[in-house]
Image (cartoon, rainbow, N blue to C red):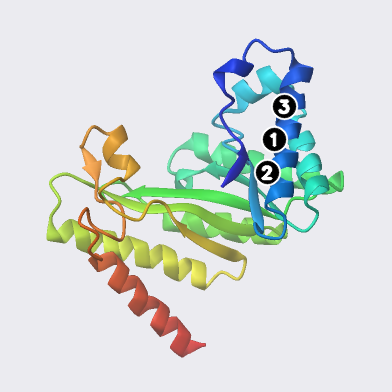
C-alpha cells in the first residue's frame, strides 16, 4: 500500500543523488504499471516514526520531492501520507499528528498535491482507546480538506483468548466502523490481515497477543465480523 517506507540496506552507502535516482525510478515503474488500476498510493509510510532516517539519507525536502514525483507519474491517483497516531494516547503521537497537519498546509501552500492521511489503526482491547481524540483528528483533517483512510485496522487481544475478550474486540471494531460511517471524510476502512493464523501481532509479540482479525486461525468468521455486518445494515437502513 506504499511507495516509500524503510529504505533497503544496499542503499545505505550510496550518495544521496543515487538514492533519489533509484527511488524516482521505482515510483515511475510502479505507478506507470498500475496506472488506471490503483486509485490510492501511500506515498510515504511513517514519515515521523522513520523521519530521522529519511532526512539523514534523503535530505529535509524528501516529502516535497516524493509527492511531486508521484503526482507527475500518475496525476489521477490520490496521494496519501500514512502514519500511526495511537489516537493521542501519548504526547509523542499528538506531536506527530500536529506535524502531519503542518505538512499538509505546507504542501498545499506550494501547490504540491496531497489528498489524504492514512491512519494506521492497530488497537488493543486491554489498552485505552481515546475516542475523543480520534474524532478530533478526523474533524481536523476534514477542515484541511483531507480524506482519512484507516489503512491498517485490527483489534488485538492479549492471551488467553476468552469470549469476553472477543466481545470487547467486536465492540471496538464496531465503534471505529460507526465513527467512520458518520464522518464524511473517512473514505477507506481497510482491514489489516484477515486470518488469525498469520496475524502480525502474534509474530512480533512471541504469542503474547494475537487473534486480531475477522477470521480465526481455521478461517471461520468471528463475532467481530457478524457484529460489523449488523452495524453496516443499520446504517444502510438509516440512509
- Classify mark 1: helix, strand or loop: helix
The reply to whether the C-beta atoms of the residues labelled 3 and 2 are less than 8 Å apart is no
- The answer to which of 91 and 44 lies nearer the viewer is 44
Sequence-first tag of 3 and 2: 3
Residue 192 pos. (x, y %): 41, 52
* Residue at position x 31%, y 61% in the image: 214
The image shows residue 25 at horizontal and vertical percentages of 75, 33
Query: In the figure, 17 relative to 180: above or below?
Result: above
Give the answer, above or below, for where 84 lies relative to 125. Answer: above
Residue 30 has which mark?
Answer: 2
CA gap between label 3 and label 2 equals 12 Å
Q: Quadrant of residue 9?
A: top right
Cβ atoms at labels 1 and 2 below 8 Å apart? yes
Q: How many marks?
A: 3
Q: How packed is label 3: few (under 14 Cα within 10 Å), some, or many (20 or more)?
A: few
Q: Is residue 182 left or right of residue 174?
A: right
Q: Residues within 10 Å of mark 1 (few under 14, many from 20)?
A: some
Specify whether residue 77 is in view.
yes
- Between 122 and 95, the one lying in front of the other is 122
Q: Which residue is mark 3?
A: 22
| Vertical placement of residue 67 versus 196, above or below | above
Identify the residue position indicated by label 1 in the image: 26
Q: Quadrant of residue 64?
A: top right
CA distance for labels 1 and 2? 6 Å
Residues marked 1 and 3 touching at CB (< 8 Å) = yes
The residue most toward the right is 110
Crowd tier of the residue under label 2, counting other residues whose Cα lies within 10 Å: few below 14, some 14–19, many 20 or above: some
Side (left or right) of 188 relative to 129: right
Judging depth in this view, the residue of 218 and 60 nearest the camera is 218
Residue 67: x and y, percent? 76, 42
Amino acid at each position: 500500500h506504499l511507495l516509500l517506507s524503510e529504505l533497503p540496506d544496499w542503499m545505505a552507502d550510496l550518495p544521496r543523488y543515487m538514492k533519489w535516482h533509484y527511488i524516482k525510478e521505482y515510483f515511475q515503474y510502479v505507478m506507470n504499471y498500475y496506472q488506471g488500476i490503483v486509485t490510492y498510493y501511500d506515498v510515504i509510510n511513517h514519515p515521523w516514526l522513520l523521519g530521522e532516517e529519511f532526512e539523514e539519507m534523503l535530505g529535509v525536502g524528501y516529502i516535497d520531492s516524493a509527492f511531486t514525483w508521484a503526482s507527475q507519474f500518475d496525476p489521477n491517483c490520490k496521494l496519501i501520507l500514512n502514519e500511526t497516531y495511537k489516537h493521542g494516547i501519548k504526547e509523542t503521537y499528538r506531536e506527530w499528528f500536529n506535524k502531519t497537519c503542518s505538512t499538509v498546509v505546507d504542501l498545499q501552500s506550494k501547490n504540491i498535491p496531497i489528498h489524504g492521511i492514512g491512519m494506521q489503526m492497530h488497537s488493543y482491547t486491554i489498552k485505552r482507546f481515546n475516542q475523543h481524540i480520534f474524532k478530533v483528528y478526523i474533524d481536523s483533517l476534514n477542515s484541511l480538506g483531507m480524506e482519512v483512510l484507516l489503512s491498517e485496522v485490527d483489534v488485538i487481544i492479549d492471551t488467553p483468548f476468552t469470549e469476553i475478550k472477543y466481545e470487547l474486540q467486536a465492540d471496538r471494531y464496531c465503534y471505529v466502523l460507526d465513527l467512520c460511517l458518520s464522518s464524511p471524510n473517512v473514505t477507506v476502512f481497510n482491514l489489516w490481515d484477515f486470518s488469525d493464523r498469520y496475524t502480525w501481532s502474534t509474530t512480533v509479540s512471541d504469542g503474547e497477543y494475537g487473534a486480531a482479525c475477522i477470521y480465526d486461525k481455521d478461517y471461520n468468521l468471528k463475532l467481530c465480523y457478524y457484529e460489523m455486518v449488523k452495524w453496516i445494515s443499520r446504517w444502510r437502513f438509516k440512509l
